Amino acid sequence: MRLVFAGTPAFAAIALRAVVAAGHEVVLVLTQPDRASGRGMAVHASAVKELASAAEIEVFQPPTLKDAAAQDRIRAAGAEVVVVAAYGLILPQPVLDMPRFGCINIHASLLPRWRGAAPVQRAIMAGDTETGVCIMQMDAGLDSGPVLLSARQPITLDDTSSSLHDRLAEQGAHLIVEVLAQLPMAACPQAISGISYAAKVSKAEAPLDWRLPAVQLERQVRAFNPYPGATFSLDDNLLKVWRAELVAGSGLPGEILAADQSGLVVACGQGALRLTEIQRAGGKRLSAAQFLFGTQVREGSHCRLSPS
């Protein structure tokens, strides 16, 4: 099938690789403009651009698809379908209407639950026990179009956003190849109940509020691994938590109940959390034993209570 592919991060690149391997003719790849990132703020190409360039597929990086010139470029590709995966730009109605089979999106949730930008993180934070991937026929709404095909994926108790993302990316790649082989397909409208929205995750959400229940903070640690990372302050030092586990314990919220090689145990609003992998600002990820080797932490001391 002759198609245009629109996507930006690794989640999308995995799908693009599968589409190319299945023998489809990808005539144009849309991806977001190169951005500065990392400690040195060097400009980097997206994962999708790197893959497309290596495969010698034409790449187009408009800042918006709302202007006529960008739309003309897409129209000239003559695609039968546009495949979208974590692209990051809104497709206006003229673009949605261009291809014979429309625009279809790979979305990492079981719609209508977790429409929006961060379905993986929000599912973990909410304590969901399963999620999945939907291949959706796009319309003008936010992830509101009818579903062509879906598959479920369990969320384990030790899943981070990273581990769950990787499984969903592979699942989505498999499903999109299956859908492309069957077009045209009948689509099933989404349920009108059970709708929830997955707002984009921001760095402002990173601080742990020790007044909250430990179960909620443990989910936050897993959901924000790798980005933006859950953080807390101890003795005016900002620390990032990569791994934590629920333990028995009680005390004032933010109180250090124990500090040994197994981790830092911190009292929460309900229960306690053992922090087992910690990172100092500008440093490397360390096990609790490694962290405590270079940092003295006294039992009874307190982490900053409020994230503000």
Image: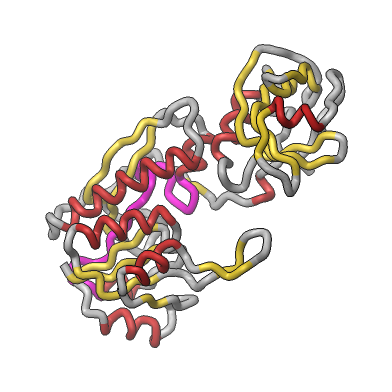
Main SS category, magenta section = loop
Residue 190: x and y in percent read: 30, 47
State left or right for residue 245 relative to residue 78. right
Identify the image quadrant of the C terminus.
top right
Q: Is 189 rendered above or below residue 23? A: above
Residue 151: x and y in percent read: 27, 40
Please tell me whether residue 116 belongs to the stretch shown in magenta.
yes
Q: How is the image coloured?
A: secondary structure
- Figure quadrant of residue 273: top right
Residue 279: x and y in percent read: 70, 39
- Figure quadrant of residue 168: top left
Please tell me whether residue 200 belongs to the stretch shown in magenta.
no
Identify which residue is drawn at 30% across, 58% down: 17
Can residue 268 be seen at all in this image of the molecule?
no
Q: Is 11 rendered above or below residue 126? A: below
Work out whether residue 239 or residue 72 is closer to the camera in this orientation and state it: 239
Identify which residue is drawn at 45% across, 58% down: 9
Query: Which stretch appears magenta?
Result: 98-119
